[in-house]
Structure formats: structure tokens, C-alpha cells
Amino acid sequence: MSKKIEVNGLLAKVLSQSSDDVFSSICDHLIGDMEASQTKSMLVCCASSGEGATTLATGLALAMGRKSDGKILLIDGNCHNPSITNLMGLSRLRGLADVLCGAANVKEVVKKTDKPNFFLIGNGIIGAEYMKTIQPPKIVSLMKQLSENYSFILLDGPSINSYPESILYASQVDSVFFVVRAGVTRAPVAEKAFSRLSGAQRDKEKIKVVLNRRIFAIPQSIYRKL
């Protein structure tokens, strides 16, 4: 494995958009659910781009790395807007796409970061036949292999209504965080995406809707006590 990847810039970007306390709070609930349901993998996605799925996936991975003794893996599964890959300087390195097409093995693409228990896999080098490589059997095989070495896997997927990958990913993970941006995402748009997700992940209880950037009319510290 190569030298550690520094994530301070990524951390600053994440925390500039949401409070670290929010990620820690979600993480506490998530860890409890993981222990109860033996959940080991999660897709984080949204209906349309810009709703905060990547921010949530990254923030959760960082928070879980701090709170967990096990290794946490964050995978950039969005070849259309690979924010994690670009921010971490992994754009020209092999990653998810290369493993799925057989051009690299898992050990070659996992990058250790300078944050506790936090590991990354970038999107990789995307070829013309990329969509043919992300078929369910290959994803199943990869997730099974990764789950043997990592305590929890977070997969950042592209917007559901624009691209097909998140629907493919959803059927191969233990749970899904569906991010909806408050005051921005229109109800029909969210309903269309949720319907597609429900078709892929038949157990609707495994799909958790996360309302992002909710505006509180009163201070959040007071709101939590109501």
C-alpha cells in the first residue's frame, strides 16, 4: 500500500458544509444499528446531484473511523462526478473501475489516510466499457471480499434519477442512506428516486431517508429537547 493520503482538505470541505456534531450523532445511531442488524455496507445516494450525499458519506466515514476500532472504507462509486476521487488526488490512480474490470486487485487500489481507521478507494480509470463492468455478480464478489477486511463500507453513488449505478449498488449493500435536501428537492423528484430504490432494495426498512440542511426556526439545542 502506498503512503498515507492526507485528508485535511477533504475534512475542511466536509465540515464547512455541516457540523461535525451532526456526523457524530448519526454515526452513534448507525453503529448501534450495525451491531443489532450485522450491517457491514451502506450506499449513500440522492435523487439529483448537489443534495449532499458525498458530504454525508465522507463525514460518516471520518466519524466512524474515530469512534470505531475497526477499519472503515469509503468508496467513490460516482464516475460522473467523482468528488472524493478529485479532492483526494486519486484521479489518475487505479480504483473501483479497475477492480471491477479485472485490471487491478483490491490491495492495489485501497489507500490509507492520515485519519484514524479511515481508508479510501477512488473511482479509478474509467474506460469506454465501464458500465458493462458494474454488473451485480462483480459487485457482489467485491463487496464480499472487502467485508472480510473492513468493519464497515460506505459507497458514494451518483444521483439516482440521472444515472443507473446507484440502483445496481443498492441491491448489493446491506442498507441505503437516501439524502434529500430540505427546501430544494421537489417531492415528485424524490418520490421517483425512492421508487427506483425500493425496486432494487426490496426491504424498504433498509432504506433510511436523511433530510439534509433542514432549517430550524429555533436553535437546534432547544429543538432536540422538545
Image (tube, helix red, strand yellow):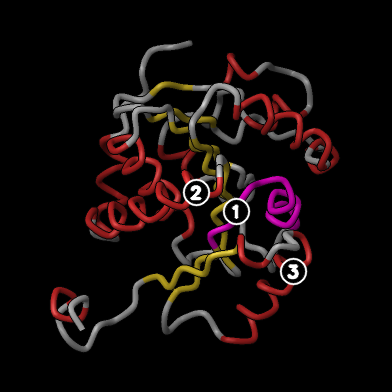
Which residues, given as a range, are shown in magenta?
164-177
Marks 1 and 3, the one that precedes in the sequence: 1
**Residue with the mark numbered 3:** 196
Q: Is residue 80 magenta?
A: no
* Residue 103 on image: x %, y %: 74, 18
Type of amino acid at the residue the image marks with label 3: Arg
* Residue 141 on image: x %, y %: 76, 29
Q: Nearer the viewer, mark 1 or mark 3?
A: 1
Residue drawn at x 78%, y 40% as measured from the top left: 134
Marks 3 and 2, the one that precedes in the sequence: 2
* Residue 70 on image: x %, y %: 40, 28
Residue drawn at x 81%, y 42% as measured from the top left: 136
* C-alpha distance separating marks 1 and 3: 15 Å
User: Secondary structure beneath disc 3?
Assistant: helix
**Residue with the mark numbered 1:** 175
In-front residue for pair 190/144: 144
Type of amino acid at the residue the image marks with label 1: Ser
In-front residue for pair 200/36: 36
Q: Would you identify the image quadrant in which residue 118 lies? A: top left
Residue drawn at x 25%, y 52% as measured from the top left: 15
